[in-house]
C-alpha cells in the first residue's frame, strides 16, 4: 500500500522556505508525493502551484500542491514580520495533526526563525524539535543527522563545550542509545542495529590517562545494554571513527557532543545531510540548514538538503520512489 503524502510545513516566510518548496517539487514530481502547508501568496510569483483542500489530492497534482493557511500580511524576503509568527506555528500544528490522523505519512519541516516566533507569538520552545515533542506528548526525543554516508546522534547538543562533562550522565547516554536503537529498527528497517559509541576524551581516555569518563560513565552503560542484547561498539576514539572502513562497521554513531557528531557528517556530505527527530510517534525530517535570509528571494538557495529530507521521510514511511 502506498503511504499518504508528506506534509511539508512552510517555515519562516522571510527565509528561503517559499523558494525551496517549488524547486523541490520540480525535482521530486512523480516520485515523492508531498504538499506544502502554508500561504500560497508567499510563493515566488513565477512558481506554479495548485491549491488543494485535502492531502489526498497531492499525489496527482501537476504543480506544487498547497494546503492553504492564510498568514497576516505579505512576504518580505529577508525581513521577518512578527505578525506572521502565529501563522508559522499554525502550519506546524496543522502538519502534526495531519500526520497524527494518518492523512500524511510524515512531516518535513522547512526552517523557522526562533527569535521571530518569540517576538511575534511568545514562542517559548528552544526550537522545532522541542515544539514537536510537546505537540506529540513526548518526554524525550533525539536529534540524528543522516545521509547515505553516515548517521550520527549527539548525546549533548547546544551547550558550551565546557559544560559537556557535567551534562553527560549515565541516564542521558542510556536514553539516547535506547531511542536510537529502537528507531533504527522501527523507522530505518534495520533488524539488528550496530551502534558505535564515541568516547568523550582524546583516544577514548587512553585507559584513564586522558580522562575517566569512559571508564566510570560510558563503559558501564554500554555493558548494561550489551547484556540486553544490543550490538554496541565502544567507547571508541573519535579520531578513528569516521573513515570509510570504520563507517562500514556500524549503522549509526553515538557521539558525546555537538561538533563531535556534526563535523564528520558535514565534511562528508554537507549538502545532503538531513535532520531526523527520533523518538516521536511519527516521522519527522528537515533540511540541515537555517532560514538563510541573505538568499531569500534570490533564486540562489540550494534545494538539495530539502530534497534529501523528503526522500528520506518517504523511505522511512515505506514509500518506494526509486530516488
Image (cartoon, rainbow, N blue to C red):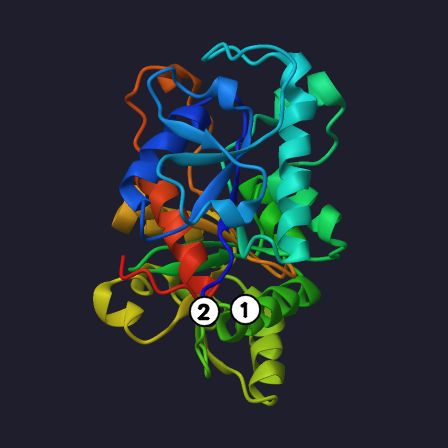
Identify the secondary structure beneath mark 2: loop
Question: At 57% across and 41% down in the image, what residue appears?
Answer: 158
Are the residues tagged 1 and 2 within 8 Å (C-beta)?
Answer: yes
In the image: residue 210, left or right of residue 27: right
Q: Position of residue 160 (x, y in %)?
A: 57, 39
Residue 305 sits in which quadrant? top left
- Please give the label number shown on residue 214: none
**Quadrant in which the C terminus appears:** bottom left
Q: Position of residue 3 (x, y in %)?
A: 49, 62
Q: Is residue 87 visible?
A: yes
In the image: residue 127, left or right of residue 196: right
Give the vertical position of 21 relative to 8 (above or below).
above
How many dots with numbers? 2
Q: Position of residue 5 (x, y in %)?
A: 49, 52
Question: At 58% across and 52% down in the image, what residue appears?
Answer: 156
- Between disc 1 and disc 2, whose residue precedes? 1
Q: CA distance from mark 1 to mark 2?
A: 7 Å
- Please give the label number shown on residue 183: 1
Q: Residues within 10 Å of mark 2 (few under 14, many from 20)?
A: some
Identify the secondary structure beneath mark 1: helix
Q: Residues within 10 Å of mark 1 (few under 14, many from 20)?
A: many
Q: Which residue is mark 2?
A: 188
Amino acid at each position: 500500500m502506498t503511504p499518504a503524502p508528506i506534509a511539508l510545513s512552510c517555515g519562516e516566510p522571510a527565509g528561503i522556505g517559499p523558494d525551496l518548496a517549488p524547486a523541490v517539487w520540480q525535482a521530486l514530481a512523480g516520485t515523492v508525493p508531498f504538499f506544502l502547508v502554508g500561504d500560497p501568496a508567499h510563493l515566488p510569483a513565477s512558481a506554479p502551484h495548485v491549491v488543494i483542500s485535502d492531502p489526498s489530492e497531492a499525489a496527482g497534482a501537476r504543480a506544487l500542491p498547497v494546503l492553504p493557511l492564510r498568514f497576516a500580511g505579505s512576504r518580505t524576503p529577508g525581513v521577518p514580520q512578527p505578525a506572521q509568527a502565529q501563522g508559522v506555528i499554525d502550519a506546524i500544528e496543522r502538519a502534526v495533526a495531519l500526520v497524527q490522523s494518518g492523512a500524511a505519512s510524515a512531516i518535513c519541516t522547512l526552517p523557522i526563525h526562533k527569535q521571530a516566533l518569540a517576538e511575534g507569538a511568545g514562542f517559548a520552545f528552544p526550537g522545532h524539535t522541542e515544539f514537536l515533542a510537546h505537540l506529540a506528548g513526548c518526554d524525550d526525543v533525539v536529534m540524528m543527522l543522516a545521509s547515505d554516508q553516515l548517521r550520527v546522534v549527539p548525546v549533548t547538543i547546544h551547550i558550551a563545550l565546557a559544560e559537556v562533562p557535567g551534562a553527560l550522565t549515565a541516564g542521558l547516554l542510556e536514553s539516547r542509545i535506547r531511542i536510537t536503537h529502537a528507531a533504527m529498527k522501527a523507522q530505518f528497517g534495520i533488524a539488528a542495529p550496530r551502534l558505535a559509541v564515541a568516547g568523550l576524551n582524546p583516544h577514548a581516555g587512553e585507559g584513564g590517562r586522558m580522562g575517566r569518563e569512559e571508564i566510570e560513565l560510558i563503559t558501564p552503560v554500554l555493558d548494561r545494554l550489551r547484556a540486553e542484547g544490543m550490538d554496541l561498539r565502544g567507547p571508541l576514539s573519535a579520531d578513528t571513527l569516521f573513515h570509510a572502513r570504520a563507517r562500514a562497521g556500524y549503522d549509526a554513531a553515538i557521539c558525546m557532543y555537538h561538533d563531535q557528531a556534526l563535523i564528520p557528517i558535514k565534511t562528508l556530505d554537507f549538502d545532503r545531510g538531513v535532520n531526523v527527530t527520533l523518538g516521536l510517534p511519527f516521522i519527522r525530517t528537515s533540511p540541515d540548514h537555517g532560514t538563510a535570509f541573505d538568499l531569500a528571494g534570490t533564486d540562489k538557495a540550494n534545494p538539495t538538503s530539502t530534497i534529501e529530507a523528503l526522500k528520506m521521510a518517504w523511505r522511512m514511511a515505506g514509500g518506494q520512489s526509486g530516488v
